[in-house]
Image (spheres, helix red, strand yellow):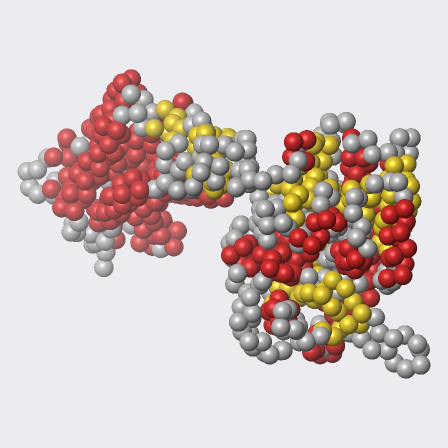
Amino acid sequence: MTPVLLCLLGLTISAPSATSDLQCILQNVFKPGFMADGHFIIGGIFPLHYNQEMPDLNFTYKPGSVKCNGVDPRAFRWALGMKLAVEEINNNRKLLPDHTLGYKIFDSCAYPLTGQRASLAVLNGQNEADKPMCSGAGPVVAIIGESGSAQSIVLSRILRPFMIPMISYFSSCACLSDRREFPTFFRTIPSDAYQVKAIAKLLLHFNWTWVGVVRGDHAYGQFALQGLLKELEGTSVCLAYQEMIPLFYDTRKALEIIHVINSSSAQVVVVFSAEGELTPFLKDCLEQNLTGIQWIASEAWVTASVFTGSKYYPLLGGTIGFGIRQGHIPGLQEYLMLVNPETQLPNCTGQETLNMQHAAYMNTSSTRITYNVYKGVYAIAHSLHNLISCNPGNGPFINSTCADVTKIYSWQLQHYLQEVSFTISGERVNFDLKGDSIPSYDLINWQRGTAGNIELVKVGMYDEAREAGSELLIYETALLPVSICSDSCPSGFRKAVRNGEPLCCFDCVPCDSGKISNQTDSIDCMACPENYWSSDDGTACIPKVVEFLSHDSMGVTLTVIAVVGACVTLTVFTVFLYHRKTPIVRINNSELSFFILLSLTLCFLCALIFIGEPTSWSCMLRHTAFSITFSLCISCILGKTLVVLAAFTATQPGNNVMKWLGPVQQRIIIFSCTLVQMLICTAWLISSPPFPYRNTQYQHSKVILDCSVGSDLAFWCVLGYIGLLAGLCFVLAFLARKLPGNFNEAKYITFSMLIFCAVWLAFVPAYVSSPGKFTTAVEIFAILASSFGLLVCLFAPKCYIILFHPEKNTKQHLMGKDK
């Protein structure tokens, strides 16, 4: 953190000692102010220091700044979890495409006053030049924060006039669910309203009927105590005492509380407190040699690794409490290892290490609060994505308008945040009408580890979504002390024995894709059935995604092109029909031109049969309709080519070839050539017709639904016959390309066949190599491209003369005999 940042926050940080390596790293990694630019800026407020030293407030001179002490390695990890999430989103082409997230992260020092200053710094910037006038949208669209409920209450009240949404990752006070007082507050941690229910059920489960309560001097402790008293009404559980740790820690008051605990017959103590104020209190408990207490920890400190050292075991061993459900953040541990201290502000040796006192920083085995931060950032990103994806005229605001992407107001983002719903790491994330997340906890027990320290062991869970009466689930055997070589492998993993070590020593290896394990300590993973695939966490087989060329963006685009092609062809047909008595239409049999236009219309329309879920009828129809319509079209063009060639040779003396190519003969040629294709298709449908095919081999995680051609020989015979007709037509037209006259139709037929053959020659390798639904898309493209090629080459020149140069639409001009 830079001096400017410290000035804004009213903070000072003492110079790092020889052992405070993380503090040296922290002060340098957060240079300058832990900020990054982007299209949308989100704020982050974290308790990077966990206690504070208040200045002398004697009102005789200006007080000094609050002094922050005690680097919190967990909070440092939380902040980097936010930074990791932002960088992942910025590298994700599907989420917020063409937009990036920026961030501004500040230290709250785990205290409402300094948290208030941090929030103002997030909104205003680091210096006076960064303070924009209040015109238009603000620079910060949302804030990730804060940890303590007391700080979140202060921050939320500051942000309320600006309607800036705030997502807390660790503030669980039930009071924050009041939408009238905190309308912009959201959280990814469950409300204490559910935590106190869980604690009450835990007390009743173990028949602990005589308990004491110790709480912090803030809203979190106050509302938690009130909630617990309400839950215990009408039960057999009674409170022996209620004590409060002062906000400004006082050793004398702490000793009084310890005396009450020692002198009471209640051996179970429930503690609703934040990590910061609890740290000096537990140190005093150690000095007073307080033992024999069964501590019930609230989620605020049940996973605090600062208390897991071996010196705390005589005091805290056996502690049990409800912690936030852990989640998986891919790549987090590797990302934390990227922290590299510089040798500035203050001077560091550059050789600092994250030693045992800061092991919490690298503890990613059970990410809980970091995962909450991670989910919060993704909730903002998904809400922004939904906002910028709004369709004009279908928006949620006045007159069905959408937000202006260049000037997003925070209240607009709040609307989308309230409605957001997405899945991350196999978990569904959304908020209820109060801004709360789904209530679910892990039951944590503090057991002695092999090194004498405290290990946090999951011994049960509490899930409000379960059936009434069964919300609390406890693994009774897990509450016993353990001595094991390797931790149990959870669902989604399998045991992998270490070479040269006993069978009880193993590593937990994730199941390969397509395999699952749905129980702990699985020796092997089970393969999913053919039409199923493994879930992201490898614990269940889920149906594979079925993929085919549907009416999505690609399907709609191809549909529009096909319909446009058919409409253009019918338009040309109308033009020709209207001008049917003009020379350019009547030249070498207008009837053939109308046949070609009708067959081209069918060619365009047959492309529509390829779009949609394949069925038995559509699979048979799509290939036969395509082959017959194209055969009809090329047969008509072949007949026209023969007429052109015969007309030229008929000008020679004594040559009466035209009598063999009259209208009747032309119809026979067209019918005969088309009939051959119809016979091939009939034999195809009888022997081995096309059918719907579920391809599970090409891409194992998907089922590609397509049409199998049935008989490859028949399929290529159909294409080959069309190619034969096109090739014959090309050769004949090429021979007649230099016929005299201003309108040589053979030349245009040559070009049309050249384009037709080029398209279908390129189709073969593209068809064979295209994956999934793109195979069908390639075939449709070939149909449309070749149809447009024939339409443009054969009819565009004639339409041009008919519509724009009617003076050339004369027999003399077409014969090249006009002056």
Vertical side of 778 occupied by 125: above or below: below
Q: Can you say whether 148 is above or below 552 in the image?
A: below
Query: Whole-percent x and y of residue 66?
Result: 80, 72
Q: Which residue is drawn at the image coordinates 59% and 50% (left, top)?
A: 451
The residue positioned farthest toward the left in the image shown: 654
Q: Is residue 394 above or below residue 13?
A: above
What is the x, y in percent for residue 49? 72, 65
35 left or right of 247 in image:
left
For the residue pair 209 and 658, the one nearer the viewer reads as 209
> In this view, which residue lies farthest toward the front?
289
- Front one among 262 and 460: 262
Classify residue 163 as left or right of residue 569.
right
- Rendered location of residue 589, percent (x, y): 26, 37
Front one among 182 and 803 = 182
The single residue placed furthest to the bottom in the displayed view is 61
Residue 307 in the image: x percent, y percent? 70, 54
Q: Quadrant of the N terminus?
A: bottom right
Q: Which residue is at a point 24% across and 32% down the rendered structure image?
A: 716
Residue 779 vertical placement versus 169 (above, below): above
Visible residue check, residue 30: no
Give the mark count: 0
Residue at screen point 66% across, 53% down: 310
